[in-house]
C-alpha cells in the first residue's frame, strides 16, 4: 500500500511539533528503550538528562544550553513504505536549505542533514532506513558542521538501530479503538498502527483519511482551558462535559489543520487527544457525534495507563 499523506506528514513532525495535547510521550523512566542516557553522555559530552521516553521508540534528552537530542523510530508494514518515509525526510530537509551529507555503513541508507551556517539554531539530523524501520536522531543547539559531532551521532544511531526490535510498534489492532470502529469513521480497510499502549493511528491510503489517539502524562484542567483559549480565534469549539471537566472539541480550524476534528480531555493524571481527519473534506459536528462513543469506550484503557 502506498504511504498515505497522513503518515508522510506524521513521520516528519512526530517530535518536532509541540502538539496541543502535549508531547504525547511517556514520563521519564530509568532509560530510553533504544539508547541509555550514559551512552548519550559518552558520545556528546555534557550532562544530558532524559526528558521523555516511550516504549514505541521516541525519546528526548536535554543538556540545557549545550543542546537537545531527539530520537524517533517509525516502523512501516513493508520496506517500500519505510523508503518513502526516508525520502520524505530528505526532501523536507533540502526544501528548508539543509545540506545533505551521506553516511556509509548505517542500515540500508543513511544521511545527515546539516543546517545552514546562518540558521537561527544550529541542528544536525541523522536519518537511517533499514528494512521496515526509519530512525531519526535530531540534535539541536550543537555545531552541526563539526565532524566530531557527526561521528558521535552516527555512533548513537548505530547503537539505537541495533536495538530497534525493542521498539513497541505493531500493526492490525490496538487498545484505543477496534478495526470496525476505525472503518466506520474513516472508511473501509484502515491500516492500524499501534505505537505502544499510549498511541494508535488508523489511516486509509487512498483518501488520506486518518484517526489518531494519543496520550501524555502532563494533564490538568487548567492546561485544557489554556489550550482552548489559545485556539479560540482560529477554530470552532465545543465544550464536552460528558467527557469530564475541561474537555472540548475543535474543528474548522485555520489551515493546515482545517480538515481535522480534535478532541482534548483529561483521564486521571493523563491528557488524551483524539484527531479525526476525513481526508477529503473538513470534519464537523456529525463526525464529532460519531467519534464520541468511540472515545467513551476507550476511557477504561486510558485509565489503566501509568501516569
Image: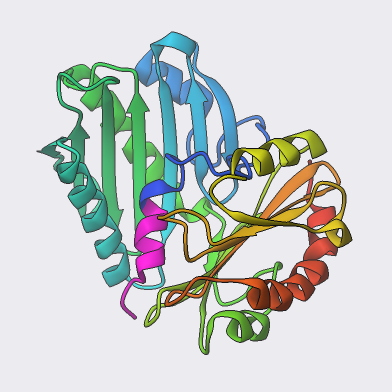
Q: Is residue 8 above or below residue 96?
A: below
Residue 126 belongs to magenta span: no
| Main SS class of the magenta portion in the image | helix
Q: Quadrant of the C terminus?
A: top right
Residues shaded magenta: 1-11
From this viewpoint, is residue 197 visible? Answer: no
Q: Is residue 256 left or right of residue 22?
A: left
Q: Residue at x 41, y 41 (%)?
A: 160
Residue 59 located left or right of residue 184: left
Depth check: give the residue in front, 34 or 212: 212
The image quadrant of residue 6 is bottom left
Say which of 38 and 46 sits in front: 46
Residue at the (54%, 80%) spot, across then down: 186
- The residue most toward the front is 233
Quadrant location, the N terminus: bottom left
Seen from the viewer's position, the closer of residues 221 and 294 is 221
Q: Is residue 97 above or below residue 84?
A: above
Q: How is the image coloured?
A: rainbow
Amino acid at each position: 500500500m502506498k504511504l498515505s499523506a497522513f503518515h508522510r506528514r506524521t513521520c516528519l513532525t512526530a517530535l518536532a511539533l509541540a502538539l496541543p495535547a502535549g508531547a504525547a510521550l511517556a514520563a521519564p523512566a530509568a532509560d530510553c528503550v533504544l539508547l541509555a542516557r550514559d551512552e548519550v553522555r559518552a558520545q556528546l559530552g555534557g550532562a544530558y538528562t532524559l526528558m521523555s521516553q516511550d516504549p514505541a521508540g521516541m525519546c528526548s534528552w536535554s543538556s540545557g544550553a549545550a543542546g537537545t537530542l531527539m530520537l524517533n523510530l517509525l516502523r512501516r508494514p513493508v520496506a517500500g513504505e519505510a523508503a518513502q518515509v526516508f525520502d520524505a525526510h530528505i526532501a523536507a530537509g533540502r526544501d528548508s536549505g539543509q545540506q545533505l551529507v551521506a553516511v556509509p555503513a548505517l542500515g540500508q541508507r543513511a544521511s545527515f542533514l546539516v543546517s545552514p551556517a546562518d540558521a537561527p539554531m544550529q541542528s544536525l539530523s541523522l536519518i537511517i532506513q533499514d528494512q521496515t524501520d526509519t530512525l531519526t536522531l535530531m540534535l539541536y543547539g550543537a555545531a552541526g558542521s563539526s565532524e566530531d559531532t557527526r561521528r558521535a551521532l552516527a555512533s548513537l544511531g548505530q547503537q539505537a538501530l541495533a536495538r530497534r526490535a525493542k521498539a513497541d510498534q505493531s500493526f492490525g489492532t490496538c487498545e484505543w479503538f477496534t478495526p470496525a470502529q476505525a472503518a466506520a469513521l474513516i472508511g473501509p480497510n484502515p491500516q492500524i498502527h499501534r505505537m505502544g499502549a499510549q498511541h494508535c493511528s488508523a489511516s486509509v491510503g487512498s483518501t488520506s483519511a486518518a484517526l489518531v489517539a494519543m496520550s501524555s502524562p502532563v494533564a490538568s484542567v487548567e492546561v485544557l482551558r489554556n489550550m482552548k483559549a489559545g485556539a479560540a480565534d482560529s477554530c470552532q469549539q465545543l465544550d464536552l462535559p460528558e467527557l469530564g471537566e475541561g474537555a472540548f472539541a475543535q474543528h474548522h480550524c485555520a489551515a493546515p489543520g482545517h480538515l481535522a476534528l480534535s478532541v482534548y480531555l483529561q483521564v486521571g493524571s493523563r491528557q488524551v487527544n483524539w484527531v479525526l481527519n476525513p481526508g477529503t473534506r473538513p470534519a464537523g459536528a456529525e463526525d464529532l457525534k460519531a467519534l464520541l462513543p468511540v472515545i467513551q469506550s476507550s476511557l477504561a484503557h486510558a485509565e489503566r495507563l501509568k501516569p
